[in-house]
Image: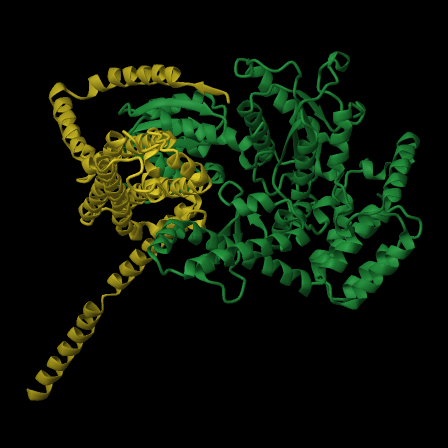
Chain colours: A yellow, B green
Amino acid sequence: MVTRNLTDVFVLMRNNASQNRNIYSDQIINDRMALVEAGGIELAQREDYETPQWGDTLEEARYSITRLREKLKELAALQEVHMQRPTFDESTHQELQMEVLTQEISKMFSRIQRLVQQIRHASENDRKDQERRLSYSVITSLLTSLQELTNHFRGLQSSYLNRLDSREERSRLDFGSKEEDRELFSVNGFNDADWETECIDERFRVTKPGQSISEQQMLLIEEDNAKTAEMRDKQVSSIVQSIVDLNVLFKDLSTMVVEQGTVLDRIDYTLEQTSIGVSQGYEQLVKADRSHAKNRKMMCIMCLAPVTLIMLFLLIIIKF
Amino acid sequence: MNVITAVKLYLTKMTEESGPGMKILVMDKQTTSITTMVYSQSEMLQREVYLFERLDMISAREPMKYLKCIAFLRPTKENISLLSKELRNPRFGVYYVYWSNIVRKADIKTIAECDEYESVREVEEFYADYLAIAPHLFSLNIPVSYQDLAWDPVELLRSTQGVTAVLLSLKKCPNIRYQSSSEMCKRLAEKVRDVIVTEESLFNFKQDDITPVLLIVDRRDDPITPLLNQWTYQAMVHELLTITNNRVDLSHVKDISKDLREIVLSPEHDEFYAKNLYLNYGEIGQTMKQLMEEFQRKAKSQQKVESLADMKNFVENYPQFKKMSGTVCKHLVLVSDLSNTVANNNLLEVSELEQQLACQESHSSQLQNLRTLLNSGNVRHKDATKLVMLYALRYERHSNNDIDGLLNILKKNSVPDSFIKMIPRILKFRSKNSRLNETFDTQEAVVKITKRFFKDLKGVENVYTQHVPLLRETLDDLIKGRLKETTFPFLGENSAQISRRIKDVIVFMIGGVTYEEALAVHNINCSHQNIRIVLGGTTIHNSASFFTEVQNATANLPTTRHDNRRM
C-alpha cells in the first residue's frame, strides 16, 4: 500500500498564493474596510461552527460505548477466571464483583439508550434537510453499535449460565460413579475433609447419620450449603434480570439487522436516493413556480375589469 | 495480493487520519463505486462517517462547519474545478483531500490558490483507483474501450491509471509482458512503463526476490469466452441478470416484494454467496436445499416459545434468524428466476451446442445440429445469434462452411438486423493472428493435437463446462516458463537476464474479462501454493455487454459481406 503525502507542497503553494493576494488587496482596500469585513466573516462563521444541540450528547454516547466495551471485556475475563476455578469455594468476592459489573453494564445500556432518545428528540426540530439526514445516520450508527454490544453481552451471559449448568451436571455425574467409593469410605468411618463442597448434600444422603459426623458438624455443613444455594440463586436471578432488561432494548434494535447486507446499506444507493429526492424537489419547485406565474386570481381580475368598464360604458350610453 | 483488502486499507486510513469527530465523505461517481464495493454504509457509520455526498451533485448548500470533510476523488479536470469552487466557499470546517491517483502539480496549485480560508488540512494520494470485485479480481468499469479497433484515448488514460494504481496499492514493480499481436497491448504497456519511469520515487519500495509480472492481453484474442452461456452461480447470474457493482436488478420478476426488487450480491457481506459463487448450477440446487433445511429447522425451533428458556433462546437468535431469512429469500428468488430462464429458453440444449462448437472439431455434425436447433424455433434470438457467431468464428476458413445459409435461417426466423450484423462484426473483431487460428504452425499443432488426444482419452466430465478459456492456457504456460517471447515479449528489458521463476502475476485484459476467466484464475491460485494471480480488465463482460463492445469497436468499419469473406 503506497501513499504519497502532498500536504507540504500544498501548504507551500497556498502560502505563496495568499502572499500574492495580500500584495494586491492592500492597494485596493483600506484598513478600516478590511477590519470590518473580517469581523463580519468571523461572526458568520461562528454561527456555522456551532454543532447541533445534540452534539454533546453524541460525544457522551460514544464515550459510554467505548467504556461499555471495556466493561464487557472485563466481565468476560472475570467469567473465564471464575469458570476455571475448580470449585465455588472462596469465590464470593469474585461473584460480588461480577454482579456489580453486570449491574453497571445494564445501567450503561439503558443510559446509552436514553442518550439516543435524547438525540432523537433534539433532532426533531432540525430545520435543514442535511442536518436531519445527519442525525438519522448518527442514531442509526449508535443503535447498530448498541445492538452489537447487547448481542455480545447476552451471548456472554447465556454461555456463562450454560457452562454453570453443564458443570453442575458433570459434577453430579461424577458423583454417580464415585458413590461406591464414598460408601466404602463412610463405612470405614473415614471422612475426607477435602471433598468438594458441591458434593456435600450428596454425601449427606449417603452417610448414615451419627456414624462419623457429629451433629454440630452436620449443622455447620447444612448452613454452608444453604448459603451456597442462596448465592447461586441470587446470581442466576441477577443474570435473568439483566436479560429481561435488555429485551426492551432489543425491540428497538431488531429492525437494524435486516438492513445490513441489503441494498439499503449501500453507499451508492443512498446517494442515488438523495439525488432523486433533490431532483423531485426541483420538479416540485418548477411546478410551483409555474402555477404561481399562472395566478388565476389575477387572470380573473384582468378579464372582469374590462368587462365592467364596457358594461359601465354601455349603461352610460343607454341611460343618457 | 488481495485487492479488496488493499482498497479497504486505504479507506480505513482515510477515516482514521482525520481523528475523532463527525465526518462527511465526498466522492465523485467513480470513487462512489470504488468505496461501495468494499465498505457498506453501516460499516462507514461505525467509523463516524455520517453523511455521504457526490461532489458533482451537491444537494444543499448549507454550511455545516462542525463536520470534517473527507474528499475522495479521482484527479480529473472536472473534479479539480468543482473542488476549487467548493473551497472558495467552504461549507465544512476542515477538508482532507485524497486523490485516487497521481495528480499534477499544476492542479494542486489551482486548488491551493482557491483555498483562501485555509480549510484544507491534508492532501494525499491514495491509489485506490479501481473496483475490487473479489480478492483476485478488479475492474475499471469502462464499458467500451475500443474505437475502430484501437484505443479510445480517454480510456487509454483511464486504463493506465487503473493499472498503475493496482501496482502501487499492491506494492509491485513488475516486468511487463504484453501480447505482441495487439497494438493496444503494446501501447498500454508503454504507457504504464512511462509512469513507472517518471514516478520512480513512488515505485521505489522493497520487493521480493522474484520480480512480479504484469501481463497485458487483448480480448480480441479470445472472443469466444464471453459468448458462452455460463453455469457457475456468479457467472450465471451475470449472464442472465447482469451484476452491476454487486447489485442485481430483479424488478422484472412478477409479484416480487419491495425489498427484493434490487438485491446485493457481495461476497464480503453475504456468507452463503461467498461460499457458493463458484459452484455450478446443479451444486447450487443442492446447497440451496441444505440451506432451506437448516432454515426450516431454525424456523421450527423459533415457533415453540413455551418456557422461559425458549423465550431466551428466541431473543438471542432472532437477529440471526431474521438475517438468515433475508438471505434465504434472496437466493431463492434468484435461483428460481435463473431456473425459469433456463427452462423457458432451452438454454441447456443451446449451451451443449455452444460448448461443442467451442471445443470439438466435427464440422458436419455440428452444422447439422445447429440447423435443427435454429429451425426448431424455441431459441432466443440472442442465443441463435451467439451460436452462429461461434460457428462463424470456428469454421470461417473451413472449405465448405455454410455461414450464408445460417444467416438466411436467422433472417427467416425474423432475428433483428442488429443481431445479424454481429456476425460479420465479430469476425472483424477477432484479431487476425489470433492464436485460435494457429493450426498451421507445425510445432504448435503437434502440441495441440496431443493435448486434444489426452483430453479425449480422459473424456468429458461435464458437457456444459468443458470449455477452458484461452487465458488459462496462457497462464499455465507462463507458470511453467513456456510462454513464448515471440507472442508475449518483455517490454524493453533484456529478457535473457530475467529469471524464469514466477510468483506474483497481475493480468490485465483490454476489452474486459469474464467471470469464467475469474474462476479459472481462482482455480490456479488454489492449486498452486506459491503463485498468486490477480486478474483485471476494463470491465466484466457478459454476452450482452460484449455485444455492445463489439458493436462499438467495429461501428465505423465497412461491414460488407464480401469484405469479411476476404479477411
- In the figure, is residue B204 to the left or right of B16? right
User: Up-down: is B17 above or below B251?
Assistant: above
User: Up-down: is B403 above or below A110?
Assistant: below
User: Up-down: is A46 above or below B317?
Assistant: above
Provide residue B507's location: percent of width, then percent of height. 66, 30
Foreground of the two, B237 or A245: A245
For this orientation, the residue located farthest to the left is A320
* Residue at figure coordinates x 26%, y 39% from the top left: A225
Provide residue B147's location: percent of width, then percent of height. 66, 39
* Residue at figure coordinates x 67%, y 65% from the top left: B344
- In the figure, is residue B46 to the left or right of B8? left
Provide residue B475's location: percent of width, then percent of height. 73, 31
* Residue at figure coordinates x 19%, y 69% from the top left: A297
User: Up-down: is B363 above or below B493?
Assistant: below
Q: Which quarter of the figure has residue B111?
A: top left
- In the figure, is residue B385 to the left or right of B201? right
Provide residue B63's location: percent of width, then percent of height. 25, 37
Q: Does residue B85 appear in the picture of this structure?
A: no
